[in-house]
Amino acid sequence: MGETNNNPFKFKLGAQTNVGCVRTNNEDNFVVSADLNAGEWLLPRDCHTVFTLGNKGAMLVVADGMGGLEAGEIASRIAVDTMKEFFSADKITDEIVKDASTIRKYMYEAVVAADNAIKRKSREEKSVKSMGTTLVAAWLFDGYANIIWCGDSRGYLFNPVSGLAQVTKDHSYVQELVDSGRLLPEYAFDHPDNNIITRSLGNPQKAANPDFVRLPLQEGEVILLCTDGLNSMLRDEEIEAVMQETSNEIDTCTKALIQGALDLGGHDNVTVVLCQIVPEENKPSVQDMQQTVSTFTEKERKKPLRKFVLWTVAFVFVLLLACLAWSFSTAWQNKIIQWYEQTVK
């Protein structure tokens, strides 16, 4: 893999996890690497730090553990550690990043390896026999976000103009009801069984079966990865409203989303990872474009009014000329009549 990188994308990172208002331990885990080539898995101290996408990309991983005692925490930690291992700088070769299919294959292998590692740990230690975890990961590479997931931890894409879009589909019982037409989507949020997942890592009866999506990176957009501790408390339109207000400040946005979940009860651990694609300097941002569209639309709205005023003024002017002409004509008619009468007499 060459060391040159012509990719212009720059980005900011933000992440936070919270135990919530009910749980006593946090079974969520996350890791981020702004530059896989550097091998650092740390959040920047300054949320305003702008990174340039390196030639091996960046990685975001979120996992939501399940199980008794600390088992869920162990499972989610194994999952993120396995992803870190697979995406160490020396493991990412030219063959892996050859095209979209090889990238997907490698990410699939990483998730399967995490699943096997959790199962192996369960067999070795009886105290963590029933542990498992969900996983969602985004590999930002060569102008794309390659997202893989297993379970109901979600990936969203936020655009200040078009809004929020869920780009993953939950592996859950309620989602299956929606897909089969037995439940309307608007009733999914409040369904009593919306915590039942159908795929996960660590399930001894099933092999991990993740899904994958590949999205082009767009300047001004924000990638959001989260555990269901966020989207089980906040509806998508509420998440969108928070991001519309705060997405320009990644740290503020991260904290606001977490706080929103806590304010509504915080029934579960909640984890949020954000990545904002920063617009190039001297190039209009998505927000600027939104303002331009808004201003243009406002001008278009004013055009009919201006046309009405101009036509009204023109009509009044023509009417005034007609009146003057009529008055002038009447005066001359009266003079002619007076001359005729005087001449005849």
Image (cartoon, helix red, strand yellow):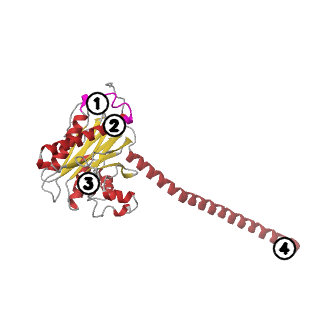
State the SS at label 3.
helix
At label 1, which amino acid type do we have?
Answer: Ile
Mark 4 and mark 1: Cα distance apart in space: 114 Å
Mark 3 and mark 1: Cα distance apart in space: 30 Å
Residue highlighted by disc 3 = 228
Q: Is residue 331 above or below residue 176?
A: below
**What label does residue 341 carry, if any?**
4
Which is more foreground, mark 3 or mark 2? 2
Mark 4 and mark 2: Cα distance apart in space: 111 Å
Query: How far across and down, in percent of the image, does residue 167 sit?
Result: 36, 49
At label 3, which amino acid type do we have?
Answer: Asp
Which is more foreground, mark 4 or mark 1? 1
Foreground pick, 193 / 257: 193
Say if residue 212 shows up in the picture.
yes
The reply to whether the C-beta atoms of the residues labelled 2 and 1 are less than 8 Å apart is no
- In the rendered image, the quadrant that contains the C terminus is bottom right
**If you read the primary sequence from the N terminus, does the residue marked by circle 3 or circle 1 appear first?**
1
Q: Is residue 173 above or below residue 334?
A: above
**If you read the primary sequence from the N terminus, does the residue marked by circle 4 or circle 3 appear first?**
3
- In the rendered image, the quadrant that contains the N terminus is top left
Q: Is residue 257 above or below residue 119?
A: below
Residue highlighted by disc 2 = 105
Mark 4 and mark 3: Cα distance apart in space: 103 Å
Q: Which residues are magenta?
A: 88-101
